[in-house]
Image (tube, rainbow, N blue to C red):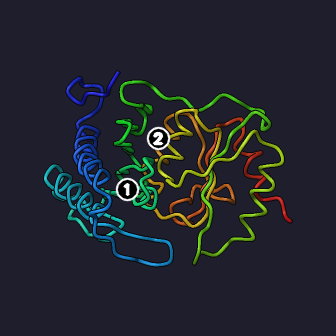
């Protein structure tokens, strides 16, 4: 069943976030159909930002500011914007999976989280091409459209599929990643790299992956996914097992059966 914000299935807060994500997503789908006409500027090695990014971020900023005018923002393109309400801050990635988008790969998402008193309180991840809306609010569970989500119940590493992100040109940690990948490859059913951290976390929440790990991620990449995974019954930590993924930029997500073993596997020295 397609999630419908008029049904009362979500709170007023979730409805605001869903509406902003859907509006930005519609613009991204239009841009995706006209990739050759997009103006693209280079931000750094293998890291690009397009007009579609900026338009989507402007849409989200406008919609959320209208609904909650006193909240602050942390956005990928605009950076931090202070709000009069110092307890609440939106954390926004208007286009997670930019490189996929620019190469015509239909695997990208809009990610919106609400941080309340320094904790992630609610999150929405919208995959506009497939019209999949993942959302969660603290204490109220996680959902895909209108369906309740639970993480995978698998507890055997040999039956498990894991997602990750690969450090690209200009990023540190290539040797470290190769060691981690070898460790996981040796004991698992498979490893996937699809290039959108928000969707990797959403898919863990949906039980499509048993786990996900990555280093060097930004807060806007993972904020919404953190609350969605946790509300689906999963565990999130940094590589030392702490609740500091947003601060460290290191994240490990898995179900409760696997999280500790998965983290120790990744920490195995060369």
Secondary structure under the numbered disc 1 in the rendered image = loop
Residue at 36% from the left image edge and 25% from the top image edge: 146
User: Residue at the location (40% across, 37% down)?
Assistant: 134
Residue 20, placed above or below residue 118: above
Q: Position of residue 225 (x, y in %)?
A: 47, 47
Foreground: 194 or 72? 194
- Dot 1 corresponds to which residue? 117
- Find residue 125 and report its image quarter: top left
For the N terminus, the image quarter is: top left
Outermost residue to the left: 66
State the mark number for residue 228: 2
For label 1, the crowd category at 10 Å Cα-Cα, with few meaning under 14, some 14 to 19 and many 20 or more, is few
Is 257 situated above or below 78?
above
Q: Which mark is residue 156?
A: none
Rendering coords of residue 141 (x, y %): 44, 31
Image quadrant assignment for residue 127: top left
Residue displayed at 60% across by 62% down = 250
Which one is in front, 144 or 32?
32
Q: Is residue 154 left or right of residue 41?
A: right
User: Horizontally, is 35 left or right of 206 in the view?
Assistant: left
Please give the name of the residue rendered at 75% of the width and 33% of the height, measured from the top-left corner: 159
Closer mark to the observer between disc 1 and disc 2: 2
As measured in the structure, the alpha-carbon distance from the residue carrying label 1 to the one carrying label 2 is 18 Å
Q: Quadrant of the C terminus?
A: bottom right
Find the residue positioned furthest to the right. 270
- Marks 1,2: beta carbons within 8 A: no
Front-lying residue, 162 or 80: 162
Quick one: label 2, few (<14), some, or many (20+) residues within 10 Å? many
Residue 55 visible in the displayed image = yes
Q: Is residue 32 left or right of residue 60?
A: right
Q: Earlier in the sequence, mark 1 or mark 2?
A: 1
């Amino acid at each position: 069943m397609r999630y419908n914000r008029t049904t009362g299935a979500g709170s007023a807060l979730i409805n605001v976030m869903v509406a902003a994500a859907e509006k930005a997503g519609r613009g991204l789908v239009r841009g995706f159909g006209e990739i050759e006409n997009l103006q693209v500027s280079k931000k750094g090695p293998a890291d690009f930002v397009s007009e579609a990014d900026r338009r989507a971020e402007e849409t989200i900023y406008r919609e959320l500011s209208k609904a909650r005018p006193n909240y602050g923002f942390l956005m990928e393109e605009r950076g931090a914007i202070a709000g009069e309400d110092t307890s609440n801050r939106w954390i926004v990635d208007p286009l997670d999976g930019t490189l996929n988008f620019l190469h015509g790969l239909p695997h990208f998402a809009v990610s919106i989280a609400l941080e309340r008193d320094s904790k992630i309180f609610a999150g929405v991840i919208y995959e506009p091409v497939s019209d999949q809306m993942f959302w969660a609010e603290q204490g109220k569970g996680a959902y895909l459209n209108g369906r309740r989500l639970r993480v995978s119940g698998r507890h055997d590493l040999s039956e498990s599929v894991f997602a990750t992100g690969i450090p690209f040109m200009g990023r540190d940690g290539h040797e470290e990643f190769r060691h981690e990948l070898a460790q996981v490859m040796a004991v698992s059913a498979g490893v996937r790299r699809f290039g959108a951290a928000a969707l990797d976390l959403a898919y863990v929440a949906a039980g499509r992956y048993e786990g996900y790990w990555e280093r060097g991620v930004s807060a806007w990449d993972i904020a919404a996914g953190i609350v969605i995974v946790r509300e689906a019954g999963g565990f999130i930590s940094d590589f030392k097992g702490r609740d500091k993924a947003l601060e460290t930029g290191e994240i490990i997500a898995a179900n409760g059966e696997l999280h500790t073993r998965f983290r120790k596997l990744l920490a195995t020295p060369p």
